[in-house]
Image (tube, rainbow, N blue to C red):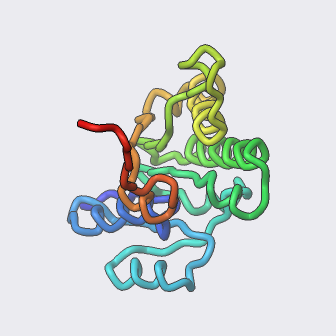
């Protein structure tokens, strides 16, 4: 019998790719967690066989309900969503940290949970001895430590997943696109 995995951010880049790959497996029943179950991306996941469930990353109760009966939860948050709505880097990071903690707290209340996957990033400020704070990295990494410190039972069944730079970021962030280097140096 297939086990249920709840995938947060299922209509986004990372969560969407996880949901689509898992939908190809007979081992998993995918529960796609989204704010907008009536959106085109959610409808596309439903058409592929996902159970689409509405939840709000700012509402622990809605997350507890969305995770109910899940054997695994894949969690990802989105710093950029908050930054691009006019929040400062610090504010966007604080929101992401709070949402990450609410996701973890909700997962910790899921009685059937066997595995929690938290998509995270290394703590840049800590790694560089305070020389290079990077809010979108540092706030997400703070969630890692809070899971370990505040939710030890959840931490024992958590995979802290570090993913690389998405190739789709090249289109999204213009400054990360390849560019021609022009030099007047003679060879």
**Residue 142: x percent and y percent?**
63, 30
**Residue 35: x percent and y percent?**
62, 71
Left or right: residue 36 versus residue 170 is right
Image point 32% across, 68% down: which residue?
20
As drawn, which residue projects farthest toward the front?
186
Left or right: residue 3 versus residue 157 is left
| Along the viewing direction, whichever of 9 and 124 lies nearer the viewer | 124
> Could you say which quadrant of the image residue 169 lies in?
bottom left
> Could you say which quadrant of the image residue 29 lies in?
bottom left
Image point 40% across, 61% down: which residue?
168
Image point 52% across, 66% down: which residue?
33
Q: What is the number of callouts on the image?
A: 0
Position of 7 relative to 156 (above/below): below
**Residue 48: x percent and y percent?**
32, 80
> Is residue 14 visible to the viewer in this orientation of the structure?
no
Left or right: residue 168 versus residue 172 is left
> Is residue 87 visible to the viewer in this orientation of the structure?
yes
């Amino acid at each position: 019998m297939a086990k249920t995995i709840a995938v947060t951010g299922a209509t986004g880049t990372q969560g969407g790719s996880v949901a689509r790959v898992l939908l190809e497996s007979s081992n998993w029943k995918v529960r796609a967690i989204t704010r907008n179950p009536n959106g085109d991306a959610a409808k596309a996941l439903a058409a592929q066989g996902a159970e689409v469930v509405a939840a709000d990353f700012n509402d622990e109760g809605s997350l507890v309900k969305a995770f109910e009966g899940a054997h695994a939860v894949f969690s990802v948050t989105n710093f950029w969503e908050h930054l691009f709505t006019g929040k400062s880097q610090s504010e966007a990071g604080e929101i992401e940290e709070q949402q990450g903690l609410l996701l973890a707290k909700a997962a910790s209340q899921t009685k059937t949970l066997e595995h929690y996957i938290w998509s995270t990033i290394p703590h840049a400020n800590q790694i560089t001895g305070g020389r290079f704070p990077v809010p979108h990295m540092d706030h997400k990494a703070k969630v890692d430590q809070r899971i370990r410190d505040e939710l030890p039972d959840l931490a024992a069944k958590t995979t802290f997943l570090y993913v690389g730079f998405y190739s789709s970021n090249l289109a999204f962030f213009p400054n990360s696109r390849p560019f021609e280097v022009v030099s007047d140096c003679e060879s």
